[in-house]
Image (cartoon, helix red, strand yellow):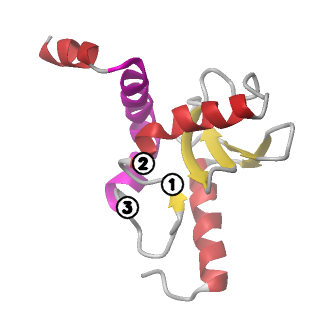
């Protein structure tokens, strides 16, 4: 009951962010447990870590609204990653390792870029290692 009362004191955006985070934490829990607030040079400059993660859904909606594409993001999309305010990565909560979709500013559609969240992580770390051999 105390949690419910506390949640009601938050603004609509704060409540939405809290709910989004619970869903994202459930699906990406192992990653967040290990990485949490940072992961060395991996994802450096990318908004994917706590606490920035909490506002990404709102920021993605705001970006798409500014671009006149407010209906592009599915209502059940869970935005877990943004890069420099022009790239949005999200998943739909349909499985324990859901596909990841991506949008870049300048596009008019969204693409399913990875078949799973785990393949997103593997590809991202692989891309990092192509440029820098050290993960720290």
Q: Is residue 102 magenta?
A: no
- The residue that mark 3 highlights is 35
* Most distant residue in the left direction: 2
Is 106 placed left or right of 72 in the picture?
A: right
The crowding category of the residue bearing disc 2, from other C-alpha atoms within 10 Å (few below 14, some 14 to 19, many at least 20), is some
Quadrant where the C terminus sits is bottom left
Element assignment for label 3: helix
In the rendered image, which quarter is residue 100 located in?
top right
Residues rendered magenta in the picture: 11-34
Task: Identify the main secondary structure in magenta.
Answer: helix
**Nearer to the camera, 66 or 127:** 66
- Of badges 3 and 1, nearer the viewer stands 1
Label number found at residue 27: none
- The residue that mark 2 highlights is 52
Cα–Cα gap, marks 2 and 1 = 6 Å
Is 109 placed left or right of 122 in the picture?
A: right
Cα–Cα gap, marks 3 and 1 = 13 Å
| Rendered location of residue 71, percent (x, y) | 75, 22
Quadrant where the N terminus sits is top left
């Amino acid at each position: 009951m105390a949690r419910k009362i506390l949640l009601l004191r938050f603004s609509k955006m704060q409540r939405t962010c809290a709910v989004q985070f619970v869903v994202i934490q459930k699906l990406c829990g192992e990653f967040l447990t290990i990485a949490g607030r940072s992961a060395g040079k991996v994802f450096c400059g990318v908004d994917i870590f706590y606490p920035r993660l909490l506002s990404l859904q709102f920021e993605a909606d705001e970006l798409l609204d500014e671009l006149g594409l407010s209906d592009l993001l599915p209502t059940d999309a869970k935005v877990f990653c943004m890069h420099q305010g022009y790239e949005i990565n999200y998943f739909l909560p349909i499985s324990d390792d859901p596909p990841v979709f991506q949008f870049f500013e300048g596009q008019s559609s969204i693409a399913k870029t990875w078949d799973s969240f785990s393949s997103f992580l593997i590809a991202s770390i692989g891309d990092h290692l192509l440029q820098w051999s050290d993960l720290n």
